[in-house]
Image: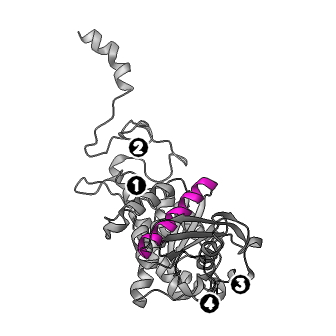
Amino acid sequence: MWKAVLDARLVLQKGLCRRIGNGVSTSIWFDPWVPSSNRTPIPLKDVSYGVAWANQFLLPDKRWNVSMEPHETSLHLFWNCAFAKAIWFTVGWGIRTDLVQVTNWQLWTEWFLPDCNRPPNVTFYKFMTTTLCIVEEIWKERNKRVHGEIESDIIKVITLIRHKNEDHMLVSTKNLTDVLTWSPPPASWLCCNSNVAISSTGCMLAAVFRDEFSNIVSITTSRALFTEPLLAEAHAVCLVAEYAANMGLNRVLFQSDNLGVVKEFRNSESPIADFRLQVAKSRFQKSCTNLLEWDINHISRKCNFLVHNIAKWAVFKNVEGSLKPSELDGSVMDDLVEWDPGSRSNGSGAMV
């Protein structure tokens, strides 16, 4: 029997993992002590550098010292590590942390105080609000990795940061910022504004896609039977989400002037607050799974007239489908002025 055990020893050793007691005799580099497919860690530096024994990772009460990493200062974690660099660059400002050479947070703060060192049109207050959101999400992700939990997709983390930032700004101002001019989306994104024109017999849904240079990429309209504004606006957003997915777009910023729809669609993981939007919300979320990144913001009607005008024009002209800007009246193509069809009517009822 013992001979059989000895013969099987080499096979067993391939799957055995050392159990850590006091850790004094377990080498972190040469002994199989990590319970994973790679039980013996591969050093990134000379094995004589820094820690060498498992007990150096233990606290006096034998708990793991998860914060032992000598390079994990707060500045490294939230600014210099690879994950932080990706967040700061991708969150919408394109900040390259390697170009801001600072050694502590005091110098970091002094660097970003002048307007010239921050992204254009970003106040220091807004910059710091976003910073707090970034720090919170990086810390959560760091803890997930330390404790062996499932890591979050970086795109999901970035989306959470954007939503948290917007929520913080709403709390501080107690209302939505009344945006009076339409602004183009970040580089590599498309902005899609949607709206509706409602008549007594139904509605016309409309959507306009524009790029980072404010160029109109696509215009589309579609008829629907909704006469209740909330449902019509919700399904207008669904229309553009489906259209974006069918176009093979990667990054889309949706904008609607219906605050109820925006709040419901933005909180993708929360329970439905308005049962009337349950079907529309599910439809929207399904389409967004085909996008690499997306976000949805509220925009004031004062600067969303372009797409509303297109919906009204489509009802008046009795057309739907894809449209070219050249097909539309010049007075329709205005974000800040509502188009007036005059006293002419196509018999479908008043439009709102």
Residue 351 point in image, percent of width and height: 53, 80
Residue 75 point in image, percent of width and height: 50, 71
Give the class, few, some or many, for how many residues have Cα within 10 Å of label 2's Cα (few <14, many ≥20). many
Give the class, few, some or many, for how many residues have Cα within 10 Å of label 3's Cα (few <14, many ≥20). few
Residue at 36% across / 50% down in the picture?
A: 148
- Is 186 above or below relative to 62? below
Q: How is the image coloured?
A: one colour
Reply yes or no: does residue 244 show up in magenta: yes
Whether residue 106 is visible, yes or no, is no
Q: Nearer the viewer, mark 2 or mark 1?
A: 1
Q: Name the kind of residue labelled 4 in the image.
A: Pro
Per the image, the residue denoted by label 2 is 28
Per the image, the residue denoted by label 1 is 145
Question: Which of these two is toward me, 12 or 199?
Answer: 199
Whether residue 27 is visible, yes or no, is yes
Q: Name the kind of residue labelled 2 in the image.
A: Ile
Q: Quadrant location of residue 99?
A: bottom right
Q: Nearer the viewer, mark 3 or mark 2?
A: 3
Q: Name the kind of residue labelled 1 in the image.
A: Arg
- Of helix, strand and loop, which one carries label 2? loop
